[in-house]
Structure formats: structure tokens, C-alpha cells
Image (tube, rainbow, N blue to C red):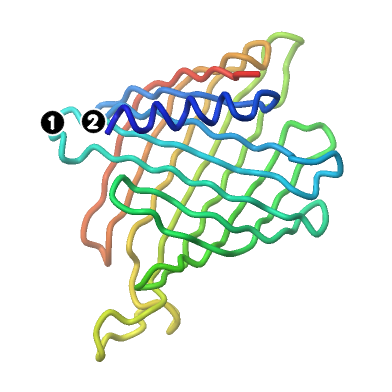
């Protein structure tokens, strides 16, 4: 499984030569997490762009808890903040196509950005999948700055899996499947290296379980 995610990261890095690609490793108390993503305009007008992310987690105690996630979205932007997106995700077992919207924001300084993708998964049972990434990296000097990043995702069922199933969340969603949050805060050196402390959280089902992982991370910005 580890080879799959490394191959995917390599393909992402080589296919889009001129894209900025951050690669991150976080060593925590329960798992080591490898994470990378890419955002790139595909045309000079910025109408078409791509977002891809790859995540691989290695659990220290139980290899069966290792996880892989690869997501790719192709987006057509109506304007600077709204677009329509299509793509899919791979969780190590199956590919799930998706269709939805993309929201983006970048401030004038270029040190604060938000990207969000509310997507409908088209595989049965259908679900709403929401992914959001927030970055804030102000510079203190020419070399040093702050680095902070928040990534969150949640998956909520849209279709009933059995006839008498109730819509338990807002009378719209049948159940909460999984949510996760990745938090990073540290220092930014020459906008090339970032390092600091991090935390990973996950919640499963309808209060069926939770996961916490705390550690340190090192991030390298590939150009």
C-alpha cells in the first residue's frame, strides 16, 4: 500500500512541473502521516485548475489501521471564488466518483487562502463529502514567517441503507460516516521549509469512536 501512495505522489510531482507542491511528514505519538497536495491553474485565464491530494498514515501498533487517501478534482471557475468541480477519490479499496462545487479565496497579500469542495459522492449509498483547506502564513522578515494550516473533511450519508432508516442529522443526512481534522502551526523559512507541531483528529460514525494523534511535522515546498 505504501508503494501506491509514493507512486501517486511521484506522478503528481512530475506531471505538473510548474506547480507548487508541499510535501509533509508528521511523526506523532500514534502514527506517522505523509501528506501532499497540489493546486494549479491549467490555463492562462485561471478558468481551469486542478486540485490533488495524497495522504498515507502508518499506525505503529496495528498495520491494519494504516490508511491511504487520494483525491483529485478538476474545476472550472465561474469567477475568482466559485466553480464547479468533478473528480473522485481512492481509499485503497475502491474509486468513488464525485461532482460538486469549489470555493476559493486568496487575500491581496497572498498569505491567507481558503479552498473548499462540497461534493456529492456518486457511488451508492450516496454521500455528501466536504473538504476544506485553510492556510495562513504571514512573513516576519524576508527569511522567516509563521506557518499555520487547518484541513478538515466530513462525510455524511444522503441515501438510506435500509427502508426504515431515519435521517438523523438535520432531517437531511442519514448518518455521519467519518470526519477528520489536521492542524499544523510552526515556522516558515524562506517560504521553502516549514516545521512545528501538529495534531490529527478523527471521529467515526454516530459517536462510535474517535482518534487523536499529536506530534511534530516537517514540510518542504517543491517548486
Judged left or right of residue 87, residue 29 is left
The residue lying at 64 percent from left, 44 percent from top is 50
Q: Residue at the bottom extreme? A: 164
Label 2: which secondary element: loop
Residue occupied by mark 1: 61
**Above or below: residue 164 compared with residue 175:** below
Q: Nearer the viewer, mark 1 or mark 2?
A: 1
Q: What mark, if any, has residue 84 been given in the picture?
A: none
On the picture, is 104 further left or further right than 72?
Answer: right
Proximity of marks 1 and 2: CB atoms separated by less than 8 Å: yes
Q: Nearer the viewer, residue 152 or 49?
A: 49
x and y percentages locating residue 67 in the rendered image: 28, 40
Give the percent coordinates (x, y) of residue 81: 77, 54
Nearer the observer, 162 or 181 = 162
**Element type where label 1 sits in the image:** loop
Q: Is residue 159 left or right of residue 24?
A: left
Q: Could you tell me which residue is drawn at 41 percent across and 61 percent down?
A: 155
Q: Which residue does the image show at 31% across and 54% down from the upper left?
A: 203
The image position of residue 76, as x and y in percent, is 73, 55
Q: Residue furthest left?
A: 61
Q: Which residue is mark 2?
A: 30
> From mark 1 to mark 2, how far is it between C-alphas?
8 Å
66 over 13 or under it: above or below: below
Marked residue nearer the N-terminal end (1 or 2)? 2
Q: Quadrant of the N terminus?
A: top left
Amino acid at each position: 500500500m505504501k508503494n501506491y501512495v509514493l507512486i501517486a505522489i511521484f506522478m503528481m510531482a512530475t506531471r505538473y512541473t510548474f506547480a507548487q507542491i508541499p510535501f509533509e511528514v508528521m511523526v506523532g505519538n500514534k502514527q506517522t502521516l505523509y501528506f501532499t497536495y497540489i493546486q494549479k491553474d491549467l490555463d492562462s485565464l485561471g478558468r481551469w485548475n486542478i486540485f490533488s491530494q495524497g495522504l498515507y498514515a502508518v499506525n505503529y501498533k496495528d498495520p491494519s489501521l494504516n490508511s491511504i487517501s487520494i483525491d483529485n478534482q478538476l474545476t472550472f471557475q465561474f469567477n475568482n471564488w466559485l466553480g464547479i468541480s468533478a473528480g473522485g477519490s481512492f481509499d485503497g479499496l475502491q474509486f468513488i466518483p464525485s461532482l460538486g462545487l469549489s470555493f476559493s479565496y486568496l487575500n491581496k497579500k497572498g498569505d491567507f487562502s481558503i479552498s473548499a469542495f462540497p461534493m456529492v459522492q456518486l457511488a451508492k449509498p450516496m454521500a455528501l463529502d466536504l473538504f476544506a483547506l485553510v492556510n495562513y502564513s504571514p512573513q516576519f522578515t524576508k527569511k522567516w514567517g509563521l506557518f499555520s494550516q487547518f484541513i478538515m473533511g466530513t462525510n455524511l450519508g444522503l441515501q438510506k441503507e435500509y427502508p426504515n432508516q431515519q435521517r438523523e442529522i438535520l432531517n437531511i443526512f442519514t448518518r455521519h460516516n467519518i470526519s477528520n481534522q489536521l492542524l499544523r502551526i510552526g515556522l516558515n523559512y524562506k517560504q521553502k521549509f516549514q516545521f512545528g507541531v501538529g495534531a490529527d483528529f478523527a471521529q467515526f460514525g454516530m459517536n462510535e469512536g474517535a482518534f487523536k494523534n499529536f506530534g511534530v511535522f516537517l514540510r518542504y515546498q517543491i517548486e
